[in-house]
Image (cartoon, grey):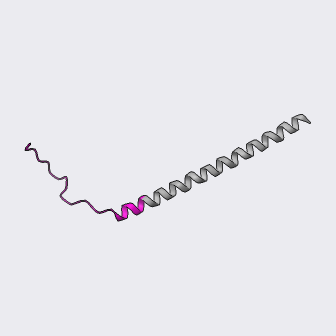
Amino acid sequence: MELELTYSFGNAQASFAQKVNLALTKKVLDTAELKGDQMVEMLKTSQAPHPTLGMSIDLKG
């Protein structure tokens, strides 16, 4: 009887840990998706650099 209780309690703990792990993973994925969407929007609204910017270096100090 004691072995059955221990097994049942162990299963309950494992099930709870699995549910917590799954919820945390979903939260991380949702956050990553949101950050990715924000990055895409930022790249769409950023201005292109000047076409000649960085093409030459002034070596006269």
Q: Of all residues shown, which one is farthest toward the right?
A: 1
Q: Of all residues shown, which one is farthest toward the top?
A: 2
Is residue 50 a member of the stretch shown in magenta?
yes
23 relative to 9, above or below = below
- Label the magenta part by its dominant secondary structure: loop
Q: Of all residues shown, which one is farthest toward the front?
A: 61
Query: Magenta residues?
Result: 39-61
45 relative to 54, above or below = below
Residue at image point 35% right, 65% down: 45
Residue at image point 51% right, 57% down: 33
Residue at image point 18% right, 58% down: 52
Residue 50: % across, % down: 21, 60
Count of number-bearing discs: 0
Left or right of 39 on screen, residue 1 = right
Quadrant in which the C terminus is drawn: top left
Left or right of 31 on screen, residue 55 = left
Residue 4: % across, % down: 88, 38
Quadrant in which the N terminus is drawn: top right
Is residue 59 a member of the stretch shown in magenta?
yes
Q: Splitting the image into 4 quarters, where does residue 41 fall?
A: bottom left
Q: Of all residues shown, which one is farthest toward the bottom?
A: 45
Left or right of 29 on screen, residue 22 = right
Residue 46: % across, % down: 33, 62
Residue 55: % across, % down: 17, 53
